[in-house]
Amino acid sequence: MTKDKYTFDDLVEIVRKLRAPDGCPWDREQTHDSIKENTVEEVYEMLESFDSGDGAKMADESGDLLLHIVFHASIGEASGEYNIDDVTDAVCRKLILRHPHIFSDENFANSAEVLDNWDSIKRAERGQTSVTAEMKGISKYLPSLIRASKAQKKAAKSGFSVENRNFFEKYEKKVLHFCEINGITSEEGFSRMLFGMVSVANRLGIQPEIALNSEVDKFIAEFEEFENGKL
């Protein structure tokens, strides 16, 4: 099956052959759950490749992630869940729907308006009728720092910031005061403080990833009270 240049259709066919009854035993045994951690790993390896400036490496790592997308679709096809055509159909429909200024007659003045409209359409698609629902929709599989940042930004757009929190005086304000008196204003200074907090967590036997995710849950619960007029 040697070719000068392989296509997306070739990849789909190769994966189908690998997972066929007479294909590779390992590939046939895999499930969504058994390879999901590998899928996440491929995402990070692709992101790392972008920093290399090496086009061949970027293509190689992007191919590894694409393989996982096709592989999961093959698993889905075998179980009757979905297939690769459903994947491409879904993303094409999403792009067309979320770009009415390109595929319809709507007009936006700038990219900020485009993003606001994108978010509105996304909320409608997901049936999210409140900002709280939107915040709860942030994937818990994200690294906790990214999830925390996303939740705080969504809350801030609705007028809720750390100053509104029940625990602000006890925790966040002390952190801000510590940064002020120690002159921590740069990314380097903050990163050292954050790294130090991880070290403290390790000494206390606390898993920082789990702890921060728990705090994000509390923050969303507080925002929900704020949105419902209880704060």
Image: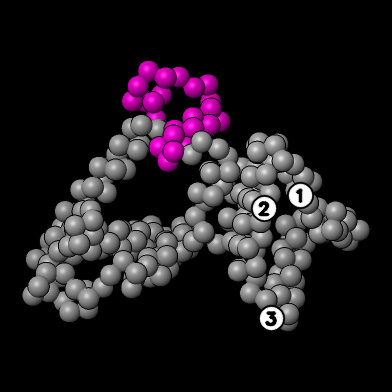
Badge 3 marks a residue whose secondary structure is loop
Q: Which residues are magenta?
A: 99-127
Can I make out residue 5 in this image? Answer: no
Q: Residues within 10 Å of mark 1 (few under 14, many from 20)?
A: some
Q: Residue furthest right?
A: 181
Amino acid on which disc 3 is placed: Gly
Mark positioned earlier in the residue sequence (2 or 3): 3
Question: From mark 3 to mark 1, how far is it between C-alphas?
Answer: 26 Å
Amino acid on which disc 2 is placed: Phe
Q: Nearer the viewer, residue 1 or 227?
A: 227
The residue under label 2 is 219
Secondary structure mostly taken by the magenta-highlighted segment of the chain: helix
Amino acid on which disc 1 is placed: Arg
- Residue at (44%, 38%) from the top-left corner? 127
- The reply to whether the magenta stretch includes residue 220 is no
Q: Does the CB distance between marks 1 and 2 fall below 8 Å?
A: yes
Q: How is the image coloured?
A: one colour
Question: From mark 2 to mark 3, how far is it between C-alphas?
Answer: 23 Å
Question: From mark 1 to mark 2, how far is it between C-alphas?
Answer: 8 Å
Q: Nearer the viewer, residue 21 or 225?
A: 225
- Residue at (14%, 60%) from the top-left corner? 13
The residue under label 1 is 165
Residue 172 x, y percent position in the rendering: 80, 56
The residue under label 3 is 205
- The reply to whether the magenta stretch includes residue 105 is yes
Badge 2 marks a residue whose secondary structure is helix
Mark positioned earlier in the residue sequence (3 or 1): 1
- Name the quadrant containing residue 19: bottom left
Residue 81 x, y percent position in the rendering: 23, 56
